[in-house]
């Protein structure tokens, strides 16, 4: 197996970890009201940026098989569902806590790989899944007035996000194997742009939030949004190419690096850019994240071996 997929797969969580902090900063500092709806429209519309570059990479992208078009539409819809669930969870929780739940993606990935791609799941992998779930449960509880509370909002939204991501990658692999990665990504980004237009036109609340944000945002904030979309799309392209060269479940295992990247970046932001910090540096909170990352990391490692 060509191991170049690993570098592509690890590049993606690093780029996305920067996106996670940009998302949280934008939500926390600039879009407290209606931020989720506004950012969904921004993200969907910004997908058009990648279209000309994808065309340059493969001028044959316009030659698409009619039978695969509906599947590409489905992956784009799943992408929007993922974004909505992730932003909804991020709005009320810290970046590291939210991203830790992405360690569940390999579990969903193995399930979808088993159902749709004929990939197998061993008893050892089942045990590793249990360890990953244990690790994510560490950040599923929070202390409120001396009592432990289950963060059902974060858990619910992130379970939906993980399921959407794993299903999207599995479906993407099926389509891209029959067609090619550049063509699939090209049409997916066009569909995403169309979804953004539809949401803007038919969801009044999101449209108002989007227009209000655009009127009040300064140039630096718009620059952050643009940077975020570029980083995300570069990560998506790298990840999509990696999925083409390895089993879905194995590629998804590299998601363990994203929580580490997010955690380290959060500490660096708190230390050097305290005005932009959005995560608690309380020693108890930090240690809880370290333990959660360690346990989920062990689980994903066992899934890999």
Image: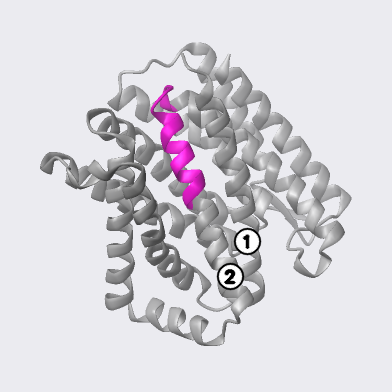
**Disc 1, SS:** helix
Label 2 crowd (10 A; few <14 / some 14-19 / many >=20): few
Q: Quadrant of residue 71?
A: top left
How far is the residue under mark 2 from the one under mark 1? 11 Å
- Give the labeled residue for mark 2: 223
The C terminus lies in quadrant: top right
- Residue 125 at x, y = what percent? 52, 17
Above or below residue 189? Residue 195 is below
How packed mark 1 is, by other alpha carbons closer than 10 Å (few <14, some 14-19, many 20 or more), is: some
Q: Residue at x 44, y 63 (%)?
A: 43
| The furthest residue to the left | 66
Q: Where is residue 196 in the image (x, y as percent from the top left)?
A: 34, 67
Q: Mark 1 points at which residue?
A: 22
Span of residues in magenta: 233-248
Q: Which structural element holds mark 2?
A: helix
Q: Does the magenta stretch include residue 125?
A: no
């Amino acid at each position: 197996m060509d191991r170049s997929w690993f570098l592509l797969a690890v590049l993606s969580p690093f780029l996305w970890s920067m996106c996670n902090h940009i998302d949280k900063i934008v939500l926390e500092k600039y879009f407290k009201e209606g931020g989720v709806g506004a950012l969904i429209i921004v993200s969907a519309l910004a997908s058009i940026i990648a279209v000309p570059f994808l065309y340059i990479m493969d001028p044959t992208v316009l030659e698409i098989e009619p039978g695969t078009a509906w599947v590409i539409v489905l992956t784009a819809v799943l992408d929007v569902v993922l974004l909505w669930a992730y932003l909804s969870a991020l709005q009320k929780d810290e970046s590291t806590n939210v991203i830790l739940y992405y360690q569940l993606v390999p579990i969903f990935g193995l399930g979808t790989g088993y159902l749709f791609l004929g990939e197998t799941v061993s008893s050892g992998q089942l045990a590793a899944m249990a360890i990953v779930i244990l690790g994510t449960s560490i950040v599923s509880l929070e202390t409120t007035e001396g009592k432990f509370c289950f963060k059902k909002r974060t858990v619910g939204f992130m379970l939906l996000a993980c399921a959407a991501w794993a299903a999207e990658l599995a479906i993407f692999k099926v389509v891209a194997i029959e067609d090619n990665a550049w063509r699939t990504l090209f049409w997916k980004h066009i569909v995403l742009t169309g979804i953004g237009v539809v949401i803007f036109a038919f969801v009044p609340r999101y449209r108002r939030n989007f227009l209000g944000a655009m009127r009040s945002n300064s140039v630096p904030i718009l620059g952050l949004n643009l940077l975020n979309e570029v980083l995300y799309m570069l990560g998506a392209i790298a990840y999509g190419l990696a999925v083409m060269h390895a089993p879905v479940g194995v590629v998804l295992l590299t998601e363990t690096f994203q929580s580490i990247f997010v955690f380290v970046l959060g500490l660096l932001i708190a230390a050097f850019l305290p005005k932009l910090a959005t995560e608690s540096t309380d020693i108890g909170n930090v240690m809880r994240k370290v333990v959660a990352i360690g346990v989920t990391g062990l689980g994903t490692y066992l899934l890999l071996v």
